[in-house]
Structures are given as structure tokens and as C-alpha cells.
């Protein structure tokens, strides 16, 4: 991964659409997918790595220029890296399937990833749902 200093004018910069997602009420057999926009508003390529989740019932996938990453779950895929060109957008697909780890009531899960943006080197996207 290419690294940059916070004070560098020529660096990648992540703009994340949201870090908290409320999936609402759902049944234990439901599957919800939320698309979250990632944008590189910097001047150098933004690299995304180390995508993982807090539970086997939660997974994530990154789509860049129509190409989709592998599906990531608890143990991620440390070898994968995606790159978003300056001024471009990508999509983080957050996927929650409570049937894979049965639960009732309020559920909180997290998607983690790393970037080479010196201001946001580690990112967390929090998912909440009320499972019936």
C-alpha cells in the first residue's frame, strides 16, 4: 500500500457516504444489502485493503469500475486490494443475513477496512437491525 502524510497536498482522500446504517426491522430469515458510496476526492489513487466483518452473518463486497471484489466476512482476504482513481466512486455492499448466526432483538455488526488516506487509515461501518 502506498502511504502519504496528512499534510501532503497530493494524496488520496476518502469521502464515505455514511458510517452508520440502520437496516430496520427484519425477520431472521431475511437478507439485507445496503450500498454505500466510497469516493476518492483526493489527487492520488485511494487503496482499499483488509476488508473484514465482526460476524459470520455479515459480509461485504467492494465494486470498483464494474468489477466486484471477493465476498469478505470475518476473516477477510488480506491479499486483496482495490484502487479508486482520483475523482471516482466505488460501492461498498454491506450484507446482513441473521440466519447465519441466529439472534433476536437489536443486532449490531461492523464492517472494517483500511485505506491509504492518512486521515482515515482505518474505517468502520456500523450496521444495526431489529431482528424479529
Image (spheres, rainbow, N blue to C red):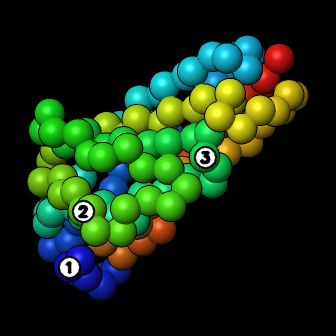
Q: Earlier in the sequence, mark 2 or mark 3?
A: 3
Residue on which disc 3 sits: 56
- Which residue is more in the foreground, 61 or 28? 28
Residue 67, image quadrant: top left
How far apart marks 2 and 3 lie (CA) works out to 21 Å
Residue 32 located left or right of residue 91: right
Query: Label 1 crowding class (10 Å Cα cut-off): few <14, some 14-19, many 20+?
Result: few
Q: In the rendering, at what x and y percent does residue 17 appear?
A: 43, 39
| Label pair 1/3, CB-CB below 8 angstroms | no
Q: Which mark is residue 81?
A: 2
Quadrant showing the N terminus: bottom left
Quadrant showing the C terminus: top right
Residue mark closest to the camera, 1 vs 2: 2
Q: Earlier in the sequence, mark 1 or mark 3?
A: 1
Q: Where 11 sits versus 101, above or below?
A: below
Q: Where 23 sits versus 77, above or below?
A: above
How far apart marks 1 and 2 lie (CA) works out to 11 Å
Q: Where 46 sits versus 66, above or below?
A: below
Instruction: Look at the numbered disc 3 and give the secondary structure of its residue.
Output: loop
Residue 41 visible? The answer is: no
Query: Label 2 crowding class (10 Å Cα cut-off): few <14, some 14-19, many 20+?
Result: some
Instruction: Look at the numbered disc 1 and give the secondary structure of its residue.
Output: loop
Q: In the rendering, at what x and y percent does residue 11 appear?
A: 20, 71
| Label pair 1/2, CB-CB below 8 angstroms | no
Residue 30, image quadrant: top right
Residue at the spot 36% in from the left edge and 68% down from the top edge: 78
Residue at the spot 68% in from the left edge and 27% down from the top edge: 99
Residue on which disc 1 sits: 2
Q: Earlier in the sequence, mark 1 or mark 2?
A: 1
Query: Label 3 crowding class (10 Å Cα cut-off): few <14, some 14-19, many 20+?
Result: some
Amino acid at each position: 500500500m502506498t502511504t502519504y502524510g496528512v499534510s501532503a497536498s497530493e494524496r488520496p482522500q476518502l469521502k464515505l457516504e455514511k458510517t452508520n446504517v440502520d437496516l430496520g426491522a427484519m425477520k431472521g430469515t431475511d437478507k439485507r444489502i445496503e450500498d454505500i458510496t466510497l469516493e476518492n476526492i483526493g489527487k492520488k489513487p485511494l487503496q482499499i485493503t483488509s476488508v473484514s466483518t465482526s460476524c459470520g452473518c455479515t459480509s461485504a463486497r467492494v465494486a470498483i469500475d464494474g468489477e466486484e471484489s471477493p465476498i469478505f466476512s470475518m476473516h477477510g482476504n488480506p491479499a486483496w486490494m482495490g484502487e479508486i482513481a482520483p475523482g471516482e466512486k466505488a460501492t461498498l455492499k454491506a450484507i446482513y443475513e441473521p440466519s447465519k448466526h441466529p439472534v433476536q432483538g437489536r443486532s449490531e455488526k461492523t464492517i472494517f477496512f483500511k485505506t491509504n488516506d492518512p486521515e482515515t487509515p482505518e474505517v468502520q461501518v456500523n450496521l444495526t437491525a431489529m431482528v424479529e
